[in-house]
Image (tube, rainbow, N blue to C red):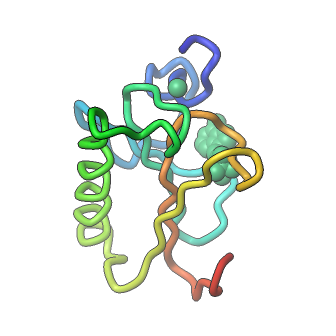
Amino acid sequence: MEDCLFCNIIAGKIPSEKVYEDDLCYAFRDISPLAPTHFLVVPKAHLASAAEVTEENAAVVGHIFAVIAKLAKDMGFADGFRVVTNCGELAGQTVHHLHFHVLSGRQLGSFN
Ligand code: AMP
Ligand code: ZN
């Protein structure tokens, strides 16, 4: 996906502050953090959003959640964090490559 921002970040064509990487996913700091810890975890294979998850490609989502749980322990925020994925423009999705926001380090409100 040549014109996809996050595909270009994964490919290293656009700089990012890497948090974690493996064969299936890439994690990097959000450029406009909403909490002291705020990074994004994305599958390396392009999927537009959570609406494109199927039985065939869903394994990467479970993998990403396992990675997030490990990072929470390793980075010291396992006591409280939020994982969010916005799906579609009505939900505030601005980058159309599936990504999971990981937020921690402040008291989070009931929905924002
Ligand atoms: P969403 O609104 O759920 O689609 O989230 C997109 C997120 O990507 C926002 O929180 C942006 O701050 C973040 N973002 C946009 N461009 C970059 C970038 N170049 N590097 C890191 N994060 C970015
Ligand atoms: Zn992409």
> Where does residue 91 sit, x and y in percent of width and height?
71, 55
> Where does residue 76 sit, x and y in percent of width and height?
32, 75
Instruction: Residue 42: tell me if it is visible.
Output: yes
Relative to the observer, which residue lies in front, 92 or 77? 92
Q: Which residue is the extreme one toward the front?
A: 55
Q: Quadrant of residue 71?
A: bottom left
Image quadrant in which the N terminus is located: top right
Q: Residue at x 24, y 36 (%)?
A: 22
Q: Residue at x 41, y 45 (%)?
A: 27
For this view, does 106 lie left or right of residue 94? left
Instruction: Residue 31: tell me if it is visible.
Output: no
**Count of marks overlaid on the render:** 0
Q: Residue at x 24, y 72 (%)?
A: 73
For this view, does 105 lie left or right of residue 22? right
For this view, does 95 lie left or right of residue 56? right
> Where does residue 106 sit, x and y in percent of width and height?
57, 83
Q: Which residue is the extreme one toward the top?
A: 2
Relative height, residue 97 to residue 100 (above, below): above
> Where does residue 25 sit, x and y in percent of width and height?
33, 38
Relative height, residue 107 to residue 37 (above, below): below
Q: Quadrant of residue 46?
A: top left
Relative to the observer, which residue lies in front, 51 or 11? 51
Relative to the observer, which residue lies in front, 12 or 50? 50
In the image, ligand 1 is in what quadrant?
top right
